[in-house]
Image: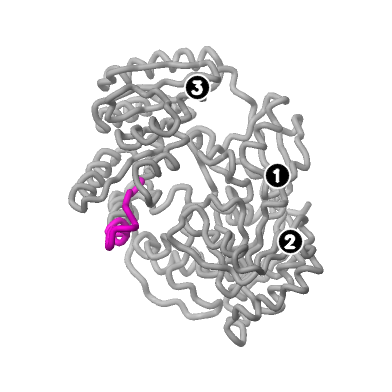
């Protein structure tokens, strides 16, 4: 493995756009050549089969691809990309399709490269504490393979049963335990990638030691715009000696928020601190019968892990702080089965709200912990003013909010009102010095909010990096940036600084 990527450089000097705009017919004409690469069964052209892939987990954005291919090896992926590049046809990589920002929405005149058949765990090395996996491997499968060695894979999105590691790399996914253990980027030691030109190469050497530019860090979270991952070397973490989960029920979100602030102020860094409001609790109870305290307006979950003596001492302090903040009921569990039962309510929350509403938007914004109360109050006011219900589920420890904006798409105008509320929530996050996304990515859904958060210079710098990897602008085009420019195009003025920059505020 080498630690550098052989990619095109010099974003300003590129061929620019293809001579002619790509067409559905051009992409479809590649099908015979694709079949020679991947096999007839792994190339889809039937309109009904193509519609299967028209969206990811965010169903409000839909596009039917011109062609779908399902490669089974890295070499096949590279050959497919080379064919697309030579024809000037856009291409998009897709994992399990659980994304929530439209990052894997296909290009109408392009090829969708589905990675779900590349799902082998190639190696588990308990001595080096790492594993080598293909991008279609599900997140939870890595922990299951590592558990006989007393190890686990720390990033754990709520969708970890079905979401793929390749998709996690694309979005730099987090999960409930990212507060202590970090996001995907903190657990990726090396990536085999196919560049937008179709070259197979490595970023990082599997040790986690980097020299020069951090291309590994830049690629992780780039939302499929810099290339396609074909192998991932992930770091494995020892299973903690002790794990305790505390559930505290409150009569208000504000009271639960005080407990979060007090716990962090006490110098305790839990593995996870999660909170749910009454509406999300109602949905979870209906879906999985998790048995949360009846009538609670908020439920706080605090999980502690580490050496037994440390966890026992922190557990005592956490219980005292939760009680002092006004908890109406406190439960604690160290048995794995009991803990799983409590976590079931939180992990089912996104899907569970489908029992309350036929359609909903899963939003993803970040605010400083100190602003949680103010932003939640603003969300409540927006809901009341608009008549659009909002269920709140969030990573309270790091201020990552996941408001679920509920609406009925059969009612004229209600989807539009829900979009307005959703956008206003992101505006509130930005106004308090936060971010438009914590772990779900920008994709196509949030690209219009990028100029509200970043300066013209910020966006131009990001696009220069993208052009260095993809000068032809064929790799997942139309994502992340509000007005993607061709490589070499003179950048234009956009807007002023993010509020946090203007105030010199610290995010956390």
* SS at badge 2: helix
Q: Mark 2 or mark 1, which has the lower sequence index?
A: 2
Residue 183 position within the rendered picture, expressed as x and y whole percent measured from the top left: 54, 42
Q: Nearer the viewer, residue 413 or 2?
A: 413
Seen at 34% across and 28% down, the residue is 299
Seen at 58% across and 53% down, the residue is 170
Q: Which residue is mark 2?
A: 42
Q: Nearer the viewer, residue 283 or 330?
A: 283
Residue 470, can we see it? Answer: no
Q: Residue furthest left?
A: 385
In 3D space, how far apart are the residues under numbered discs 2 and 3 (Cα atoms)? 41 Å
Query: Image height check: is 54 above or below 310?
Result: below
In 3D space, how far apart are the residues under numbered discs 3 and 1 (Cα atoms)? 29 Å
* SS at badge 1: strand
Residue 345 position within the rendered picture, expressed as x and y whole percent measured from the top left: 43, 31
Residue 42 position within the rendered picture, expressed as x and y whole percent measured from the top left: 74, 61
Residue 44 position within the rendered picture, expressed as x and y whole percent measured from the top left: 68, 65
- Side (left or right) of 298 relative to 492: left
* SS at badge 3: helix
Quarter holding the C terminus is: top left
Task: Tell me if mark 1 has few (under 14), some (14-19) or many (20+) residues whose alpha carbon lies within 10 angstroms of its own.
Answer: many
Magenta segment: 404-420
């Amino acid at each position: 493995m080498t630690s550098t990527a052989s990619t095109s450089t010099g974003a300003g000097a590129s061929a620019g756009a293809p001579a002619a705009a790509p067409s559905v017919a051009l992409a479809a004409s590649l099908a015979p050549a694709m079949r020679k690469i991947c096999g007839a069964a792994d190339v889809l052209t039937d309109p009904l089969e193509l519609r299967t892939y028209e969206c990811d987990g965010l169903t409000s954005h839909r596009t039917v691809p011109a062609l779908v291919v399902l490669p089974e090896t890295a070499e096949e992926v590279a050959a497919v990309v080379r064919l697309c590049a030579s024809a000037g046809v856009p291409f998009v990589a897709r994992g399990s399709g659980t994304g929530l920002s439209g990052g894997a929405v296909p290009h109408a005149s392009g090829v969708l490269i589905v990675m779900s058949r590349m799902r082998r765990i190639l190696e588990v090395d308990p001595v080096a504490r790492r594993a080598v996996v293909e991008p279609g491997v599900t997140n939870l499968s890595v922990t299951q393979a590592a558990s006989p060695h007393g190890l686990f894979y720390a990033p754990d999105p709520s969708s970890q049963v079905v979401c793929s590691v390749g998709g996690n790399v694309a979005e730099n996914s987090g999960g409930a335990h990212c507060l202590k253990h970090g996001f995907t980027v903190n657990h990726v030691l090396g990536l085999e990638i196919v560049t937008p030109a179709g070259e197979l190469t490595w970023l990082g050497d599997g040790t986690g030691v980097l020299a020069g530019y951090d291309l590994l860090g830049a690629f992780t979270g780039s939302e499929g715009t810099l290339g396609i991952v074909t192998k991932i070397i992930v770091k494995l973490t020892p299973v903690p000696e002790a794990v305790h989960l505390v559930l505290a029920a409150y009569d208000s979100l504000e009271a639960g928020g005080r407990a979060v602030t007090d716990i962090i102020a006490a110098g305790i860094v839990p593995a996870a601190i999660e909170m749910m409001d009454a509406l999300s609790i109602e949905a979870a109870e209906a879906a999985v019968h998790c048995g949360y305290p009846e009538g609670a307006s908020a439920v706080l979950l605090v999980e502690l892990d580490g050496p037994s003596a440390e966890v026992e001492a922190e557990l005592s302090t956490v219980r005292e702080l939760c009680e002092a903040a006004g908890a109406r009921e406190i439960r604690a569990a160290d048995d794995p089965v009991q803990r799983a039962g409590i976590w079931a309510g939180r992990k089912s929350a996104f899907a569970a709200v489908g029992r309350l509403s036929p359609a909903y938007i899963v939003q993803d914004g970040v605010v400083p912990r100190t602003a949680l109360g103010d932003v939640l109050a603003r969300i409540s006011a927006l809901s009341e003013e608009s008549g659009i219900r909002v269920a709140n589920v969030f990573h309270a420890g790091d201020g990552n909010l996941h408001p679920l904006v509920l609406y009925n798409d059969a009612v004229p105008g209600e989807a539009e009102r829900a979009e307005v509320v959703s956008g206003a929530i992101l505006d509130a996050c930005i106004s308090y010095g936060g971010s438009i996304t914590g772990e779900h990515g920008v994709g196509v859904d949030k690209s219009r909010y990028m100029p509200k958060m970043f300066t013209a210079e910020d966006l131009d710098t990001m696009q220069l990096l993208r052009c260095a990897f993809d000068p032809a602008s064929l790799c997942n085009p139309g994502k992340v940036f509000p007005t993607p420019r061709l490589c070499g195009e003179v950048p234009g003025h956009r807007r002023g600084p993010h509020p946090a920059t203007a105030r010199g505020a610290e995010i956390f």
